[in-house]
Amino acid sequence: MKKAYLILAIIFSFTACKSDKKNQSESKEDNKPETQEVNVYTHRHYPADQELFASFEKQTGIKVNVVNAKADELIQKMTEEGEQSPADVLITVDAGRLVRAKDKGLLQTVDSEALNKIIPANLRDENNQWFALTKRARVIVYAKDRVKSEDLSSYEDLTSDKWKGKILVRSSNNIYNQSLLASIIANNGEDEAKVWAEKVVANMARTPKGNDRDQVKAVVAGEGDIAIVNTYYIGKLLNSKNPEEVKAGNGVSVFFPNQEGRGTHINVSGAGVAKYAPNKTNAIKFIEFLASKEAQEVFAKANYEYPVNKDVTPSELLSSWGEFKEDLLALSVLGKNNKKAVITFDVAGWK
Ligand code: FE
C-alpha cells in the first residue's frame, strides 16, 4: 500500500513540475519581458568592482555584462557603435572624460530621486547625464624628512622661489593635471593660470615623466621635495606588495592645499546612462545601487577613494589624513575648460 502511494506521489510531482515549467515558458513568451541584464562599459578594473557587480546580480537578478577598456577607447567604441551600441552604462574616471562623453551625445538625462538625493549637485552633470561615484583629491605630498607642512599652503604658492628645482609632477597630457589647471582657470582666470603654469614649470625638479606613483618615488629618492598627486595613489603605495612602493608611500605626508581659501581640487570617477541604452531601467537601478550606502563602502575603499554618499565614512587610511575643505566648483566646468587648459599648458612649456 505504502509503495503504491509513493509511486503515485512521484508521478504526481513529476507532472506538476512539468506543467509548471510549461506555464513559465508560456508566460515568458506572452509578456516578452525586458532582458534581465545590464551592459557596463567601464574604465575601472578593481576586484572589488567585480564583487559589487556580483552582489547587484544576486539582489536584482539582473546580469551584469562588463566591457573593460580605457575611457577614451570606450568613448570611441560607443561613438562608432552609435544607435546599435549595446552599452547601458558608461563608467569612467575623471570628470573631464564624463563631460567629453556627454558632449559627444553618448549619454542621456536620468531622472532618479535616489541619485539626486545622494549625490551633491556639484558632483553631477547639470542635466543629470552623469553622476560621481567616488571622489579623489589632487594634493601635494611632501618628503617627511625635508619639508614641514607649515612650508606649504596652496597650489598658487607652488610658484614661489622657495620651490625652485623641488616640484615633481607628471606631464600635461594627463587629464588629472588638465582638470587641475581647468579648476585654476575657473577660479583665477586664464591669464593667472598661464603665469601659474609657467612658474611651476620653472620650479620643476625634472622634465615631467612617469605617473603619479613615480612622482612619489622620485620624492623619496631625493629628486625633488614635493609632488602633485591624487590621494588614492598613496593608499595604493602603502598597500602594495612591492616593499619599494611601501617605502615610497611611507616617505611622504599628504597636504591638502588651499584650506584657507576655496579648498582642495576634487575629481571623481562616475557613471552615466548611455544614450541608446537597451536596458535603461536596469541601468538606472545599477547606478543607484553603486551610490547606495552598501556599495559605496566597498566601492570607495577598494581604490582608497572618498565616498560620495555622506552616510559612508572614508577608509581608516583616508580618515587618518583628516577632514579637509573641498573646492566646490561644479565638476562640469573641468570639462568645459579642458581645451583652454591644454592650450595653456602648451604655451607655458609644460611637457
Ligand atoms: Fe588614476
Image (cartoon, rainbow, N blue to C red):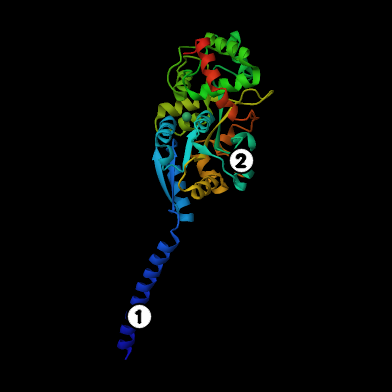
Whole-percent x and y of residue 82? 42, 37
Which of the 4 quarters of the picture holds residue 325? top right
Which numbered disc flags the more N-terminal residue, 1 or 2?
Answer: 1
Disc 2 designates what residue?
Answer: 119
Seen from the viewer's position, the closer of residues 57 and 335 is 335
Rounded to the nearest whole Å, what is the CA distance between mark 1 and mark 2? 55 Å
Amino acid residing under circle 1: Phe
Look at the numbered disc 2 and say if its residue's Cβ is closer than 8 Å to ligand 1.
no
Q: Which mark, by number, is residue 303?
A: none
Q: Judge by depth and name the residue closer to the eye, 347 or 152.
A: 347
Secondary structure beneath disc 2? loop
Label 2 CA crowd tier, 10 Å (few <14, some 14–19, many 20+): some
| For residue 172, above or below residue 1 | above
Q: Position of residue 11 (x, y in %)?
A: 32, 80
For the view shown, which residue lies furthest in the bottom direction?
A: 1
In this rendering, would 213 be left or right of 116? left
Percent across and percent down for residue 260 are: 69, 23
Name which residue lies at 37% across and 73% down. Answer: 19
Is 312 situated above or below 219? below
How far across and down, in percent of the image, does residue 278 sit? Answer: 45, 47
Q: Amino acid at mark 2?
A: Ile
- Look at 49% across and 50% down and name the residue there: 282
Q: In the image, which disc is placed on residue 12?
A: 1
Q: Quadrant of the N terminus?
A: bottom left
